[in-house]
Image (spheres, rainbow, N blue to C red):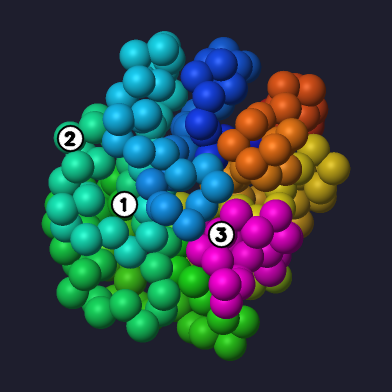
Amino acid sequence: MRPKMVKFCGITQSADAQYCIDHGADALGFIFHSASPRNLSHRRFRELSKEIDFKKCLKVAVAVAPDPNLVGDLISLGFEKFQFHFPMDLPLQEIKRWSELVGVENLWLAPRMKPTDELPADFLREAKTFLVDTYSREAFGGTGQTSDWARFVKLKKQFTQHSWILAGGLSPDNLGDALLANEPDGIDVNSGVESAPGIKNTDQIDQVFTVLKKFQAGN
């Protein structure tokens, strides 16, 4: 079955954004993290927003352990969903603050979990959606490497009241296998459809939607 949420992340160009929207994207991710090659300034995002017809496509702010001031800025920029990556030792109070600011339904938590880490029950109370990305000691996502599918399936089966978004190295070449193996509620596609960091490849985007058509409900 086609995931309910198809998100393209790391958008830096209005033409790329519009292409994804016009071909059926459910959400677009814009990154606000200085270490990312896809990082945007607030000013640049405002410029992009004026050039994009979002229609019903969700705007997702992506940040790493943001402080309340940054969260407030992202709210003021008009984002509807908030995907926050963070280390596992981040104080729970900070996560609770995010939830209070944006709402449990709008917060997407993406903890950087080691293979041996368990998902704390406290996290589950603060968000309805979780994104599982590839673990890296050096980066919070964007590695281009495939994530731990077995862990993803385990978490999805264990916590059925939450939505689970699969990320990590998804591309037209492995998307079909990923959907069959994981049955994710959502997918997050980034480097797997790029010609360069932040520059999307329309041919590869087309290929993603070709794969998704095979997984439409009822097929």
Q: Are marks 1 and 2 in contact (CB under 8 Å)?
A: no
Camera-side residue of 155 and 85: 85
State which quadrant residue 42 falls in.
top left
Residue 93 lies, in percent from the top left, at 18, 74
Q: How many marks?
A: 3
Residue 170 lies, in percent from the top left, at 71, 48
Q: Residue type at mark 1: give it.
A: Leu
Is residue 71 found left or right of 26 in the rendered image?
A: left
In this picture, is 147 found above or below 57?
below
Name the residue carrying label 1: 107
In this picture, is 84 found above or below 50?
below
**Residue 141, disc:** 3
**Residue 76, disc:** 2
The span from disc 1 to disc 2 (Cα, nearest Å) is 16 Å
Residue 105 lies, in percent from the top left, at 28, 48
The range drawn in magenta is 131-149
Which element type, helix, strand or loop, lies under badge 1? strand
Pick whichever of labels 1 and 2 is earlier in the sequence: 2
